Image (tube, rainbow, N blue to C red):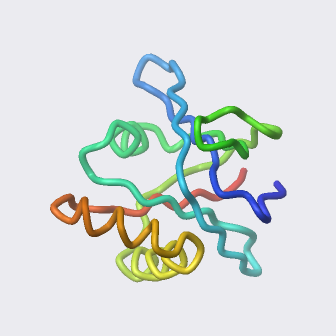
Amino acid sequence: MHLAGEKYINLETYRKNGRGVRTPVWFVESSSDDGSILYVRTSDDTGKYKRIRNNPSVQVAPCDMRGSVKGKWVKGEARIASEEEKLKAFKMLEKKYGIIYKMTRMFMSRKNYVVIAIRFT
């Protein structure tokens, strides 16, 4: 999947009944010998976090800030990132999104944030 230069991905997670829920999110990509991993920050009280805990299957596609898809959907598997990955992802997100990211963290500082790690399947 080609995501260079993209600011948003549309993340589709699945309810217990199998119905998909699509959400545009900020992301960063980390590459290694094992392939690419996408990192997405969210709070632990969101639907996407709860749905991923129940079903790790996801789909992602590049999109605009309103969620309009701009490319092909790709299947992946999501998990909650380790504390080490979470800190790495926060730094990467801050570097990519700059002052806007810092402002959202400041205004939403009372929430407990987690990072979702997505590997393409």
Q: Residue at x 55, y 69 (%)?
A: 97
Is 79 drawn above or below residue 24 in the view shown? below
Give the farthest residue toward the left.
Answer: 110
- Relative placement, left or right, of 84 versus 118 is left
Q: Residue at x 63, y 51 (%)?
A: 8
Q: Residue at x 51, y 18 (%)?
A: 19
Is 17 drawn above or below residue 99 in the view shown? above
Query: Residue 108: percent from the left, percent from the top?
Result: 25, 59
Q: Quadrant of residue 5?
A: bottom right
Query: Residue 79: percent from the left, percent from the top?
Result: 47, 56
- Relative placement, left or right, of 115 versus 95 is left
Q: Return the residue nearer the eye: 108 or 75.
A: 108
Query: Residue 66: percent from the left, percent from the top?
Result: 58, 36
**Tally of marks:** 0
Q: Return the residue nearer the eye: 121 or 95.
A: 95
Is 67 drawn above or below residue 103 in the view shown? above
Q: Quadrant of residue 95?
A: bottom right
Q: Residue at x 57, y 41 (%)?
A: 11
Query: Residue 57: percent from the left, percent from the top?
Result: 56, 40
Q: Quadrant of residue 87?
A: bottom left
Image quarter hosting the N terminus: bottom right
